[in-house]
Image (cartoon, rainbow, N blue to C red):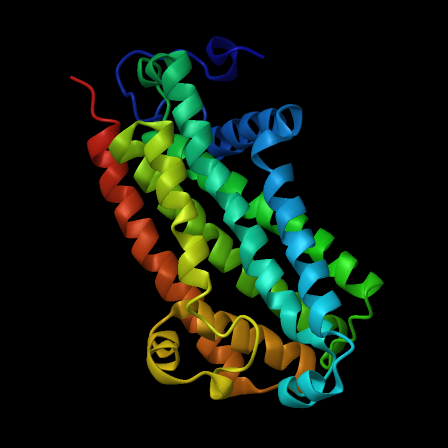
């Protein structure tokens, strides 16, 4: 289906008030970017493999250690799985690269000449990131079960963990879309995307925050990924710790709110056409 046949032509309103509704436009555009992601998995598979690799390495190093299990409060796979989930959520960064690909191919310019909502163009990329986060998180959880994962809160807890991951993935997708729209350069988008890897290691990745010392413990207290990890770990290890889970949800929601705000600004700036 070509761009011309996806959306009815209409004179005047470029924002989609004529023809298909904004939700319908968003759905069609989302289907398109997801189809491309399936056809071109190079932006998805490497990060998934890296996340699985680290999951296997961490569990292999510490999974059989009784001392580490005592410190973490249970099976180490339960403790380290949230790290892999957060890493794989970075696949939401593919959202920004899909916009860059459209811009480089000239497809975005063609969209801007049609009655297509700019909101739909950006929203489709963000939704793509959320969908990828769900699929890849489920894969990571499946690998976790193969390694002995035993969530303390059962299936319901895994659903909450997935919700936290999706909120984080949406926020990260918004971040990548912002960088892509403002820079328009794949190199810049990739560089800013990988900034999150070192930032993640300023959180309690290997051991609980109580075991950190000095400046790292102080920095970890201000790192939102700390609270994501602690909330997910509570669901997997200690049970329904409402405080830890609420903090995780709040951190994810605040990150999402910030990145969606910057995405709106970037869309206004980056998609302006005279």
Residue at 74 percent of width and 81 percent of height: 65
Query: Relative to residue 90, is residue 69 drawn left or right?
Result: right
Q: Is residue 26 above or below residue 135?
A: above
Q: Is residue 202 visible?
A: yes
Q: Residue furthest left?
A: 274
Q: Is residue 27 above or below residue 54?
A: above
Q: Position of residue 168 (x, y in %)?
A: 48, 58
Query: Relative to residue 41, is residue 21 drawn left or right?
Result: left
Question: Which is nearer the eye, 81 or 129?
Answer: 81
Residue at 36 percent of width and 25 percent of height: 16
Q: Position of residue 114 (x, y in %)?
A: 35, 15
Q: Quadrant where the C terminus lies?
A: top left
Q: Is residue 184 above or below residue 128?
A: above
Residue at 76 percent of width and 63 percent of height: 144
Q: Position of residue 83 (x, y in %)?
A: 58, 64
Q: Is residue 19 visible?
A: no
Q: Position of residue 15 (x, y in %)?
A: 31, 26
Residue at 78 percent of width and 71 percent of height: 149
């Amino acid at each position: 289906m070509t761009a011309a046949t996806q959306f009815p032509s209409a004179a005047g309103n470029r924002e989609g008030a004529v023809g298909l509704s904004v939700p319908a436009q968003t759905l069609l555009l989302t289907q398109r970017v997801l189809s491309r992601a399936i056809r071109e998995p190079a932006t998805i598979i490497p990060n998934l493999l890296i996340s699985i690799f680290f999951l296997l390495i961490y569990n292999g190093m510490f999974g059989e250690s009784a001392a580490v299990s005592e410190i973490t409060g249970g099976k180490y796979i339960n403790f380290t799985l949230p790290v892999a989930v957060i890493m794989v959520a970075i696949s939401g960064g593919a959202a920004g690269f899909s916009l860059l690909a459209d811009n480089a191919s000239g497809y975005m310019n063609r969209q801007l000449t049609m009655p297509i909502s700019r909101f739909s163009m950006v929203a489709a990329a963000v939704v793509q990131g959320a969908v990828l986060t769900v699929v890849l998180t489920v894969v990571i959880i499946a690998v976790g079960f193969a390694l002995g994962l035993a969530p303390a809160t059962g299936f319901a807890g895994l659903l909450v963990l997935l919700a936290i991951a999706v909120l984080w993935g949406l926020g990260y997708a918004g971040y990548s879309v912002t960088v892509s729209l403002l820079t328009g350069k794949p190199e810049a988008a990739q560089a800013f995307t990988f900034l999150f890897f070192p930032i993640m290691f300023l959180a309690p990745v290997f051991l609980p925050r109580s075991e950190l010392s000095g400046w790292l413990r102080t920095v970890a207290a201000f790192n939102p990924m700390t609270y994501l990890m602690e909330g997910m770990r509570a669901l997997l290890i200690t049970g329904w710790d409402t405080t830890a889970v609420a903090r995780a949800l709040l951190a994810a929601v605040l990150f999402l709110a910030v990145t969606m705000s910057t995405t709106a600004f970037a869309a206004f700036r980056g998609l302006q056409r005279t």
